[in-house]
Image: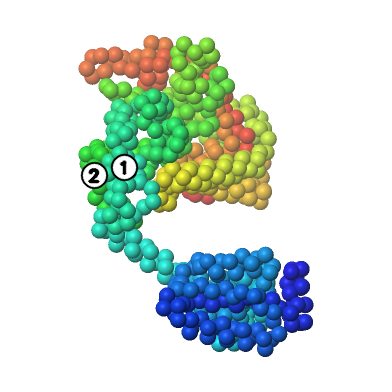
Amino acid sequence: MPSQRKRVQNAVRVTGTLRAAIYCRVSTASQAIDGTSLESQLETCRDHCERNSWVTLPDPFVDGGVSGALASRPQLDAMVAMAERGEIDVVVVSRLDRLGRSVLHLATLVQRLDEIGVRVVVVSGGVDTSTPTGRLLLTILGALAEFERVLIQERTTEGLHRRAGEGAYVASVAPYGYRRVGTGREARLEVDETQAQAIKMIYERLIVGQDSMADLVRALNEANLAPQQDGKWSVPRLSRWIRGSVASTAAGVWQYGDTRVEVPPILAQHEADAWTAWLANRDAQKSIRHSTYMLSGMVTMPCGGSATGRTAKTKSRAQSPIYACLDRLDRRADHPEQYDCRNVLVDALDNAVWAKVASALTDPRALAALSAADTVGIDIGGDGLATRLAEVTAQLEKTRERAATEYKAAVMDGFDALTAREMVTYLRDDITMLDAERGRLALALARTRRARRSKTETDEAAARVALAIENLDRDGRRAVLLAAGTEVKVTGYEECSKCSGRGYAGRGTDGAPAPCPACRRMRVLPTVKVTVTLPEALVVAREELAAAV
């Protein structure tokens, strides 16, 4: 439906009382002074208006000595402003190139006038944008303008790469540690001593000293070594920043796409290599943190808090992998709410939990009576497979939103798009993992709805399942536990029966006391309650395991 303004203008056209604005342009000063070209344009346009009984505005819009390549011209801008105020119905020009020689500008201008209901008439070409021929002109101009946009972008990119190859700094914001000096082809980077000091402190304390992010942020802010943008350092900001191209740039190479530009170094090459290796190891640990430990995200400690898998290291040796209470890790030993949760050996807890779940998979009677908790030592909850699927889907969407937010924050901090994408790689790994888990749960739900549960299972099927279980690796076991909605509660601790609570059992080859293989000198082992909230997923897992052998 046409707008009210266009309906009025259509009625005006019928009565022949259009208000016409004449636009003329001469591109050289001599033409403007001579007036020949200008007078010719004015005469052509006025004659056309008289033949159509249009009312011309008293003063034509004339840009004298102005190039058609310029998108913004004083009289042209004034005419467009008047058109937007509704004071013009038609713009008349003698030739199309009087409006401009840039296809991109022409298409934008003509489309802008058309959207507000103002016709454009080109006398010498017989073009009127209110006619089918004129509409075709708009379409052609739009296609040519899009083509010109692409050419402009390509030429701009090629020019920037060429200038970068000549050593010029072509980005708008200098990377952290540097400031831009000079302009155009002479633009270069020089070291900003204050920011360079911050980079060196980050290298010494984070890469070499292995300080925590929180301690480093505190030290940077206390030293007044501010980030590139306004404000203070924070753990999220520092975490985003170290994932960028800081190391390679600080080592003396600024990268613009595939073009390498040498800049004054802040770090030695071996220091940059150490930074890159540390970052790669850190991201690798993040990307596998959910699968490194079989029960990650499933374990609750006696205090009610969650547990996390970790492998603590000392200067002398690596400790055994453990599940540790998160609340205890976050609090100092003298904290008034410090809990007395003990570390739990990963192997001990993994084996205890899997033994109970595996018994439910291999014992036909347990599968026939999954609701009898005392049969296999597992408490069975209600049918929550669909609920678990919804939870994983929500977590997936939340992680995607976080990745988008961190990407935008990185761009606002001055990083280019490619670097910003690399900085959220670890979140993309989480998205991949959650998406895969969602797929497994969806498949389990679909198969469960189709499956016909049998009250009896053959010994042959049980034997096949037992064989398949033996071939499952840690990730395979974790997949079964996740699908079944397994919850693990450490209820307490009891003295290790193998070493009678001493922590040692026998002597090693060197004659020294050997650590107990069961408790690894911890002297106690956990007591555990395992709950499977989605027993139907175990039915599906059993069918899949039996079919796999």
Mark drawn on residue 364: none
**Residue at image location 36% in from the left, 31% down from the top:** 225
How many discs appear? 2
Cβ–Cβ under 8 Å for marks 2 and 1:
yes
- Label 1: how many residues lie within 10 Å, few (<14), some (14-19) or many (20+)? many
Q: Is residue 260 visible?
A: no
Q: Amino acid at mark 1?
A: Tyr
Q: Earlier in the sequence, mark 2 or mark 1?
A: 1
From this view, report whether residue 208 is shown above or below residue 439: above
Instruction: Answer with the quarter of the image where residue 221 lies.
Output: top left
Residue position for label 2: 264
Q: Quadrant of the image for the N terminus?
A: bottom right
Residue at (55, 87) in percent of width and height: 124
Q: Residue 253 at x, y = what percent?
A: 26, 48
- The quadrant where residue 162 appears: bottom left
Left or right, residue 330 beside residue 121: left
Q: Is residue 499 above or below residue 283?
A: above
Residue 416: x and y in percent read: 40, 50
Marks 2 and 1 sit apart, C-alpha to C-alpha, by: 9 Å
Question: Label 1's element?
Answer: strand
Q: Tell me if residue 503 can be seen.
A: yes
| Residue nearer the viewer, 342 or 16 | 16
Which amino acid does the dot numbered 2 rest on? Pro
The front one of 206 and 168 is 168
| Mark 1, residue position | 178
- The residue at 39%/33% (across/down) is 226
Looking at the picture, tell me which residue is in the foreground, 287 or 454: 287
Left or right placement of residue 57 versus residue 433 in this view: right
Q: Secondary structure at mark 2?
A: loop
Q: Residue at x 46, y 72 (%)?
A: 66
Q: Position of residue 220 (x, y in %)?
A: 37, 28
Residue 110: percent from left, percent from top:
58, 73
